Image (spheres, helix red, strand yellow):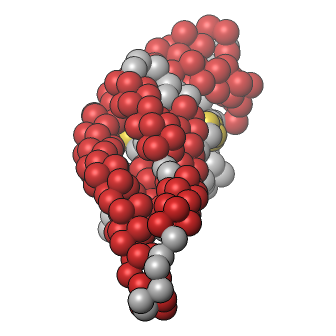
Amino acid sequence: MTGFGAGDLTTVAGRYVVEARSLNHRFLEVAVRLPRDLAPLEERIRALVQGRILRGRVEIAIIRKAFTNALNDLKQALDLSGTPDLSMLVGLPDLIKIEEPKEDLEEVWPSIAGGLGQALTRLVAMREDEGGRLARDLGERMRRVGQRVDDVEQRAPRVVKDYAARLSRRIAELMGAVPVDEGRVAAEVAIFADRCDISEELTRFRSHLTQMRQTLEADGAVGRTLEFIVQELGREANTMGSKANDVEVARDVIAIKGELESLREQIQNVE
């Protein structure tokens, strides 16, 4: 999920600005940009991020406030337009050199961790807001899938009856006045009924859909579990479509698969 959070901190060497930004990504990927003298802290920073966020591309940028002020001074001196962006600043580490005391990393780490924690808290809050909106959208899509499954279940018993009627008419057209072997017709209908029976698929589909609703309401990271459930729903839908041998059922199954594809895409944003 996307989100943004900012924080600031002060050490003996000056003030820093911290930005945490997240983008949609199937796995967790952490990118860290720091002043050179803080580079040894990169793994600690990664560990803090990994302790708060489980999925998405997370970009962490920490820059000295003096660097931002110097760039603003340069902007005014050259009469340039626009506002310095932190992601741009960290990409220009050698454009402006700020002479400041070297940091004692162990001494400044608590301050760095505090500023980063502040930014991550705000980032997580924004992601949670987006997660709430996403959950409502997923719930609505699952409701539509459930309605389509209801339609399939109502249609399924009529498929065999319609087939039996078509078969009887066809035999009558071909045989004319010749007596029809009703036992043979019944056997053909029974074979067709067994071949197109989707009751088991419907039961499993409903079970997976219930599990998906329960998972969506659960606490913690559920994205991977939801992905797996959608994959299983897709398999059951494919089987129903291939076995039912009915235009109306096929139409509903196509609609179900369309909703499942939308669910799959959205779920990739769920942590």
Question: Quick check: can you spot residue 271?
Answer: no
Q: Nearer the viewer, residue 143 or 121?
A: 143
Say which residue appears at 47% left-offset and 86% top-offset. 178
Question: Quick check: can you spot residue 110?
Answer: yes
Say which residue appears at 47% left-offset and 76% top-offset. 180
Please give left or right for residue 62 compared with residue 164 in the image: right
Q: Nearer the viewer, residue 52 or 84?
A: 52
Residue extending furthest toward the right: 40
Image height of 222 relative to 72, above or below: above
Please give left or right for residue 65 compared with residue 191 in the image: left
Please give left or right for residue 97 compared with residue 153 in the image: right
**Rendering quarter of residue 32:** top right
Image height of 200 relative to 196, above or below: above
Instruction: Give the x, y percent position of residue 139.
Output: 29, 40
Quick one: quadrant of the N terminus?
Answer: top left
Instruction: Give the x, y percent position of residue 67.
Output: 50, 42
Say which residue appears at 48% left-offset and 91% top-offset. 174
Say which residue appears at 57% left-offset and 18% top-offset. 51
Instruction: Give the x, y percent position of residue 140.
Output: 25, 46
